[in-house]
Amino acid sequence: MNVVVDLNRCQGYAQCAFLAPQVFTMHGEESLLYTPVIAEDQDERVRRAAAACPVQAIVVGKEAGSGAR
Amino acid sequence: MAADTLFRRITDYAHRADPYPLYAELREAGVVRQEDGSYLVGTYHEIAALLHDPRISSDRRNRAVPDETAAGEQGVPPSFIGLDDPEHHRLRRLAMRSFGPPHTPGRIDAMEGEITRIVKDLIAGFEGKKRIDIVDDFAYPLPVTVICRLLGVPTEDEPRFRLWSDTIVAGFDPTPGEDPAERQRAGSEARKAMGLYLGELAEKRRNRPSDDMLSAFINNEGPDGRLTQLEIMTTAVLLLIAGHETTVNLITNGILTLLRHPDELDRLRSEPPLMPKAVEELLRYEPPVQMLPQRTPLADIEVLGVTIPKGAPLILMLASGNRDPQRFRDPDRFDPTREDNQHLGFGSGMHSCFGAPLARMETQLALTALIQHLDKPRLVEDPPPYRRSPVLRGPRHLLIEDDRAGA
Ligand code: HEM
Ligand code: SF4
């Protein structure tokens, strides 16, 4: 499953897409695609992206629905 | 004391080590007009709103009384940090093509290995020293080496551009009282010299591209055109200066803050995954860019009941907004696990920091490696001596002693 986010609502020029580029991908300049199922080796990158997201829109860890794994 | 002298007191070097009580006074006073006709804003919500307000210009040429930085640069226009949309947006996008997504999504991520290696080499350089200067031995050389690599500038030229850079930073120091015209003229000259130097480096790579941004600037043509020769110069100067005059302060403020909070230092040492959030808290608690001194309203605007006239210098005190109790709970407490931390450390809105992902990664890797290496670090001097600038604020030196410093 892929999810699309409206980038016009991002307050930070898509910080997540720089810091975890395999997980968060810019689709043109208007939207962001991300994969909710994250490979183990991306954990650290996703943690960096989560800290950098200005509106704390990225939830990491168990609370993010471990069922997705 | 009178609120209309607040800016003079904030910029006074005597308050550099601890300007925070003055910021509290500023928030208390609201929007305040200064003796020289400029206006200060220090409350979080008002700063954030102004940073998103299209009536607020970043172009100094819109000032009622243009200064040397605006008027004196015969032929050298501002870089995009000093321009408004649509021109700002066009140039920022063209520069972004070779820096980040959507066109170059992997550039920053791919630098992790190299940054890690530079950090390791710098730490290896502590060998044999019992006392190290965090600034000169670590926090300054790291971002310089990284931005040189990114742009494609030879690191050996550092002594040359360090001089220009110091002069440029001094040129936009807004400290009132002293005659700024001479400093501003020197700053413009240095900006021109650095621009010519970087333009020449780019020119050498025409049709002979290497994997760096100057090469990309001169060789890549996208659907929305390319940077002109002059735009390459102003953009490269902006990136070189913004890329190293700020990150040095975040890393140094980071070590200083952790040494003042030993419990938090121990915790980060045993739980490295906390570091990304700790760096966000540093950007709130001790931001390297304390204020944005170059905004100007394009029309009369009202903020907290005060009318700021069109063309007046408008100064946004980011570091004060970051400590606003109306926005942050217990704002004077350093809390690396703070939730809801939408700080102003990288600004906000259309000019929010272009290099933020790189600065974040450098600082996280640098602080993690350094606290793992040091054993029982002690500050030799607290507070340390500070750099002159009230805008780009940080220690000039930060001496520490450690039994393991050079082990
Ligand atoms: C800890 C390090 C850094 C801090 C605290 C910082 C802070 C800031 C702030 C507050 C602004 C907003 C300026 C304004 O609104 O007028 C800004 C803009 C900018 N920064 Fe940074 N910065 C840092 C590192 C970097 C790095 C590493 C680069 C380059 C690779 C960079 C490049 C820029 C550029 C080009 C702008 C202008 C953006 C625009 O006008 O659209 N910065 N930075
Ligand atoms: S997740 Fe955060 S950083 Fe990424 S696009 Fe959304 S708001 Fe921006």
Image: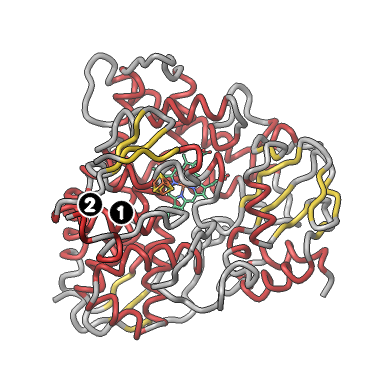
> Disc 1, disc 2: CB below 8 Å?
yes
- The amino acid type found where label 1 is placed reads Met
**Mark identifier at residue B361:** 1
For marks 1 and 2 on the same chain, the one whose residue lies earlier in the sequence:
2
B264 vs B123, nearest the viewer: B264
Judge whether B86 appears above or below B275 on screen. Answer: above
Q: Badge 1 sits on which subunit?
A: B
- The amino acid type found where label 2 is placed reads Ile
A47 vs B179, nearest the viewer: A47
The residue under label 2 is B115
Q: Residues within 10 Å of mark 1 (few under 14, many from 20)?
A: many
B345 vs A34, nearest the viewer: A34
Circle 2 sits in a helix, a strand or a loop, which is it? helix
Residue under the image location 60 percent in, 29 percent down: B85
Q: Residue B138 appears in which quarter of the rendering? A: bottom left
Q: CA distance from mark 1 to mark 2?
A: 9 Å
Could you say where residue B19 lies in the image, as x and y percent from the top left?
A: 62, 71
Say which quadrant the C terminus of chain B sits in: bottom left
Along the horizontal axis of the image, is B292 left or right of A28?
A: right
